[in-house]
Image (cartoon, rainbow, N blue to C red):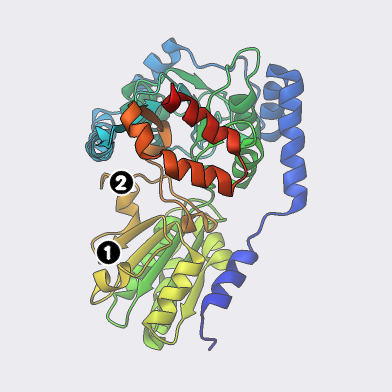
């Protein structure tokens, strides 16, 4: 059996790289939206989604009607998720307030400013993700973004999932549009006759949606590459293979392109997880069995590493979206992880729970983006603007250093602008 390390982690990632043909295809969609606006949105919704829509924007009446198709229990669950997220995002934002220093006549303040407008992409069509709407919108609302827009693909009948519409109402979304795919991202980034462009686009989606986000990032802010979901489970010899298998399947049911794997140092756990997975997948009563079987068959892996250090190196190179650590001492392993969207410690912290009601955000980086950023948060919806006020005494205290530094860089007029003030 092959022993896995950094090279194997990099090879697994390389096999999932996006083709140039995909970039060209999405670029052509974006350019058509830029050229003909609304007409392109209707055209691509019919051509790519197989849905003929009569209007782009969802009306208030449609949102009110959506409540007829949801239960009180469903609404309560959405509100609980919202409240838990509010608690954590508000605390994070609070820690950044009142950041200022005063020293030698120099006062420097860091002022938090919300973005003016953001667009949130919410996957839909064949699925429903009201939870993702909450994860995208609530941090923006906590940051006090003035205009929050939702884009979500419609069902075959042209309507958006009622739960998603109810979630938009619960979260005070300003505008909702029944548009999906790369064309939705283009509309948010460049605007159309009906849709005003936004300052930043956030939210997860399929490969085409994420390619579109990358391409429009030249002109508008984007959060990250949050594509098809990923889960890596670090499991030692004592881990319960049934829990490991169930967690892999829980993420695999999202879509056929989900990427799930196990990292371990135990040959025994490799064998036991394989048996367990085989038994569960052979059960025809397994919910969403076709999606799960295709995902596990095409995209799953088990990485057997020489020791825990090699396993940690593999994980840090792979940089998974979700990382579960199920072992005797999960904190020992987690403290050495530098690259993961979210780290879930212990057997009672499954990724399926963090997707909903643990107070964390489930919009997370995929495709190794976890190497340089974490999940979506209130920080994605604010700017930290620096305000500086200096007295004459304060400016004089740094005059000599400015003179030397400007001389080093051959920018003498920088120093002269300082000297003029001090000589006056």
On screen, residue 120 versus residue 112, left or right, reads right
Count of numbered labels shown in the rendering: 2
Q: Residue at x 56, y 55 (%)?
A: 256
Vertical relation: 349 (above or below) 74: below
Which secondary structure lies at badge 1? strand
Q: Distance between the residues labelled 1 and 2?
A: 14 Å
- Kindly give the residue lying farthest to the front in the view shown: 423
Residue 78 lies, in percent from the top left, at: 29, 33
Tell me if I can see residue 381 in this picture: yes
Crowding near pointer 2: few (<14 within 10 Å), some, many (20+)? many
Q: Give the labeled residue for mark 2.
A: 360
Q: Which mark is residue 46?
A: none
Q: Which residue is drawn at 31% across and 23% down?
A: 170
On screen, residue 62 versus residue 108, left or right, reads right
Vertical relation: 81 (above or below) 40: below
Q: Which residue is drawn at 31% across and 31% down?
A: 393
Vertical relation: 15 (above or below) 164: below
Tell me if I can see residue 286 in this picture: no
Q: Which quadrant holds residue 308?
A: bottom left
Which secondary structure lies at badge 2? loop
Q: Which quadrant holds residue 37?
A: top right
Q: Residue at x 39, y 40 (%)?
A: 398
Residue 192 lies, in percent from the top left, at: 65, 17
Residue 223 lies, in percent from the top left, at: 50, 40
Vertical relation: 302 (above or below) 342: below
Q: Give the labeled residue for mark 1.
A: 345
Depth check, front residue: 145 or 244: 145
Depth check, front residue: 303 or 143: 143
Q: Which quadrant holds residue 189?
A: top right
Crowding near pointer 1: few (<14 within 10 Å), some, many (20+)? many
């Amino acid at each position: 059996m092959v022993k896995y390390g950094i090279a194997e982690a990099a090879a697994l990632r390389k096999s999932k790289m996006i083709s140039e043909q995909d970039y060209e295809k999405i670029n052509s969609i974006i350019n058509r939206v830029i050229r003909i606006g609304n007409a392109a949105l209707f055209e691509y919704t019919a051509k790519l989604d197989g849905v003929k829509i009569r209007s782009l924007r969802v009306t208030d009446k449609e949102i009110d009607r959506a409540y007829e198709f949801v239960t009180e229990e469903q609404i309560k669950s959405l509100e609980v998720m919202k409240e838990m997220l509010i608690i954590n995002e508000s605390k994070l934002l609070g820690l950044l307030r009142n950041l200022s220093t005063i020293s030698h006549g120099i006062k420097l303040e860091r002022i938090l400013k919300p973005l003016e407008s953001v667009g949130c992409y919410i996957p839909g069509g064949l699925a429903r993700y009201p939870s993702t709407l909450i994860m995208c919108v609530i941090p923006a609302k906590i940051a006090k973004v003035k205009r929050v827009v939702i884009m979500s693909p419609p069902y075959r009948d042209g309507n958006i999932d009622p739960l998603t519409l109810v979630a938009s109402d619960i979260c005070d979304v300003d505008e909702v549009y029944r548009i999906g795919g790369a064309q939705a991202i283009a509309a948010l980034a460049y605007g159309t006759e009906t849709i005003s462009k936004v300052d930043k686009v956030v939210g997860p989606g399929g490969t085409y949606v994420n390619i579109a986000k990358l391409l429009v990032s030249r002109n508008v802010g984007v959060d990250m590459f949050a594509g098809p979901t990923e889960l890596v489970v670090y499991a030692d010899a004592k881990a319960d293979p049934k829990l490991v298998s169930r967690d892999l399947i829980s993420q695999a049911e999202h879509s056929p392109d989900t990427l799930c794997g196990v990292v371990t140092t135990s040959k025994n756990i490799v064998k036991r997880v394989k048996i367990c997975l085989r038994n569960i997948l052979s059960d025809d009563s397994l919910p969403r069995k076709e999606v799960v079987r295709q995902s596990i068959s095409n995209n799953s892996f088990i990485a057997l590493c020489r020791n825990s250090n090699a396993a940690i190196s593999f994980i840090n190179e792979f940089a998974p979206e979700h990382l579960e650590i199920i072992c005797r001492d999960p904190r020992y392993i987690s403290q050495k992880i530098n690259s993961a969207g979210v780290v879930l410690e212990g057997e009672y912290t499954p990724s399926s729970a963090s997707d909903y009601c643990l107070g964390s955000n489930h919009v997370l980086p995929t495709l190794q983006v976890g190497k340089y950023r974490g999940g979506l948060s209130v920080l994605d919806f604010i700017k930290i603007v620096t305000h500086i006020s200096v007295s004459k005494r304060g400016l004089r205290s740094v005059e000599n250093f400015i003179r030397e530094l400007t001389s080093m860089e051959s920018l003498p007029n920088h120093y002269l602008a300082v000297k003029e003030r001090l000589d006056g």
